[in-house]
């Protein structure tokens, strides 16, 4: 949709996303495979995107930035995969690393998205934090003495983002993200 709207002025694009697990429904008894039967269901969402200036007055939301990152290490590649169990039943296996991999990908997403959405004050705090860590590391190398470490500054994304749409992989996932990002209930309500 992004490339279509980028090449055709005054256009609309209908984006439909579905989640259908029926073809991958697991009929065996291995717990690693059964989890996907309970987490994922059938559902969908649709949205009309437009690059017309006139449609901007009627729109509920304005999409400013899109980001996509992927994990490329072995844990990321193997955390969700389709295979057979010991009895020969085909299914999708979720590894225990999926939460850790999702957290790392989310961190990468915010790292890429940060310069586009954060106010300059938050960006400046990040730069100062990185510079201070670099200087202290160099100082420690020259003097051969242990220097107290500075924790990296985690920017307050609430200052640049009004509403967070979090994948509903369970209430525990949403609660964990709310806690780690210090979000209030109104930031994540539907």
Image (cartoon, grey):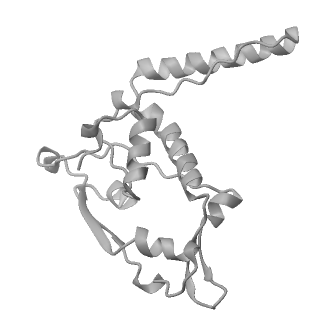
Image coordinates for residue 27, horizontal then vertical, percent: 49, 87
Residue drawn at x 44%, y 44% as measured from the top left? 176
Q: Which of 172 and 24 is in front in this view?
A: 172
User: Above or below — where is 182 with respect to 40?
Assistant: above
Where the N terminus falls, by quadrant?
Answer: bottom left
Name the image quarter holding residue 183: top left
Name the image quarter holding residue 168: bottom left
Q: Nearer the viewer, residue 57 or 165?
A: 165
Residue drawn at x 57%, y 59% as measured from the top left? 98
Q: Nearer the viewer, residue 174 or 16?
A: 174
Q: Which of 132 and 86 is in front in this view?
A: 86
Number of marks drawn:
0
Asked if residue 22 lies left or right of residue 76, the reply is: left
Image coordinates for residue 120, horizontal then vertical, percent: 42, 20
User: Above or below — where is 134 with respect to 46?
Assistant: above
Asked if residue 56 lies left or right of residue 92, the reply is: left
Asked if residue 178 lies left or right of residue 77, the reply is: left
Image coordinates for residue 29, horizontal then vertical, percent: 55, 83
Name the image quarter holding residue 132: top right
Residue drawn at x 35%, y 31% as measured from the top left? 158
Image coordinates for residue 110, horizontal then vertical, percent: 48, 40
User: Above or below — where is 165 with respect to 146?
Assistant: below
For residue 2, say whether it is visible.
Answer: yes
């Amino acid at each position: 949709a992004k490339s279509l709207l980028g090449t055709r002025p005054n256009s609309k694009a209908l984006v439909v996303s579905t989640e259908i697990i029926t073809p991958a429904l697991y009929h065996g008894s291995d717990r690693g495979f059964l989890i996907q039967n309970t987490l994922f269901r059938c559902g969908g969402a649709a949205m009309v995107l437009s690059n017309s200036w006139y449609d901007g007055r009627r729109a509920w939301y304005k999409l400013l930035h899109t980001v996509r990152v992927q994990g490329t290490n072995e844990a990321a590649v193997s955390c969700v995969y389709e295979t057979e169990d010991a009895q020969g039943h085909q299914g999708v296996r979720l590894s225990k690393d999926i939460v850790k991999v999702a957290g790392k990908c989310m961190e990468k997403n915010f790292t890429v998205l940060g310069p586009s959405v954060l106010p300059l004050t938050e960006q400046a705090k990040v730069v100062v934090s990185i510079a201070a860590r670099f200087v202290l590391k160099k100082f420690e190398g020259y003097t051969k003495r242990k220097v107290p470490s500075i924790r990296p500054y985690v920017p307050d994304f609430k200052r640049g983002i009004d509403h967070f749409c979090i994948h509903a992989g369970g209430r525990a996932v949403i609660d964990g993200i709310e806690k780690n990002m210090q979000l209030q209930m109104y930031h994540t309500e539907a």
